[in-house]
Structures are given as structure tokens and as C-alpha cells.
Amino acid sequence: MNSFTRSVDLLQRGLDVSSLRYQVSANNMANAEVPNFKRTQVNFETELKRAFESEDNARDAFELTRTDARHFKLNTVYDYRQVQPRRVVDYDSTEKANGNNVDVETEAMNIVKIQMQYKLLSLLESHEFSQVKTAMTAIR
């Protein structure tokens, strides 16, 4: 996969995760006064980092020969395209006496942060495509 395709794919995944995070934070805010409601957050970057590290480790490692399909594989690459965002519910903490753990101010700040990240990712994706457009007009 070339670097342009990989970059655009990662940016698109980032935009999708930002959109999901926005929905999750909005849902958290909407349920801020519901008794025993537990806030949800989205996990993605940790797994993505693990996938990239597995690529780096496999590139630098030596290859072992497997003579049987039942033998363990070493240095298996975890493809970053298989990484999916995961919703995680926080059951451990309680903010309010009614059992709810949503802090509206924190969620509002998360939404602002998510909006800024989304804007940045969309600008980066626009820049990627403007570079292709520039290269194509230079060829003419």
C-alpha cells in the first residue's frame, strides 16, 4: 500500500472515530441526570498503536520456519485496517448520589476537543488531495 492510500485511510478512520466519539459524548450528556447511567468512552488509539508496533517488530525480527500449521507463529503482524473503535463503559466511578457518573462540563469539553480534532483531520485530508491535484496539474 502506498503512503498516499495509507494516509487517506488513516485520516478517514480518524474522522469516523471522531464522529463516533461525538455521538457517544452527546449520549452521555443527554443521560446526565438518568439514575445509574454510566458514561461511555471510545477506545481506538491504543489498539492502533499496538498494530503499528507489531508492523515495526515484524520488520526488524528474524523469520522462523514453520514446518507444521499447528506451530506457533512469531512476529504476527496485526493489520491496522482490522482495528475497530471500541465503546467502553465506566462502571467503576460514581459522580452523583443517584449512581450516575457523567460530568456535563467534562463531556462539553470533550465535545469541543472532538470538534477541533475533526476539523484538523478534515484539513489534513484536504491537504492530501490538494497535493495530488497539484501533481496532476503539473503533469499536463
Image (tube, rainbow, N blue to C red):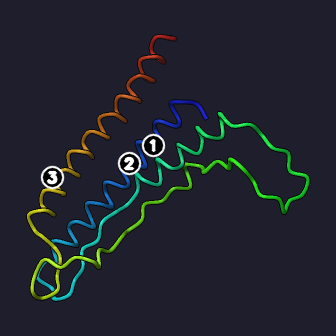
Say which quarter of the image contains residue 94.
bottom left
Marks 1 and 2: in contact by CB < 8 Å?
yes
Label 3 vs 2, first from the N-terminus: 2
Q: Say which residue label 1 marks.
A: 10
Counting other residues with Cα less than 10 Å from the Cα at mark 3, is it few (<14), some (14-19), or many (20 or more)? few
Q: Amino acid at mark 1?
A: Leu
Q: Say which residue label 2 marks.
A: 14
Q: Say which residue label 3 marks.
A: 112
Q: Residue at the location (37% across, 68% down)? A: 87
Could you say which is closer to the camera, residue 49 or residue 122? 49
Task: Tell me if residue 70 comes above or below residue 121 in the rendering.
Answer: below
Question: Does residue 84 appear left or right of residue 62 in this picture?
Answer: left
Where does the image place residue 7, in percent across and percent down from the top left? 47, 35
Task: Tell me if residue 114 comes above or below residue 135 in the rendering.
Answer: below
Where does the image place residue 65, in percent across and percent down from the top left? 85, 45
Q: Residue at the location (38% across, 60% down)? A: 43
Counting other residues with Cα less than 10 Å from the Cα at mark 2, is it few (<14), some (14-19), or many (20 or more)? some
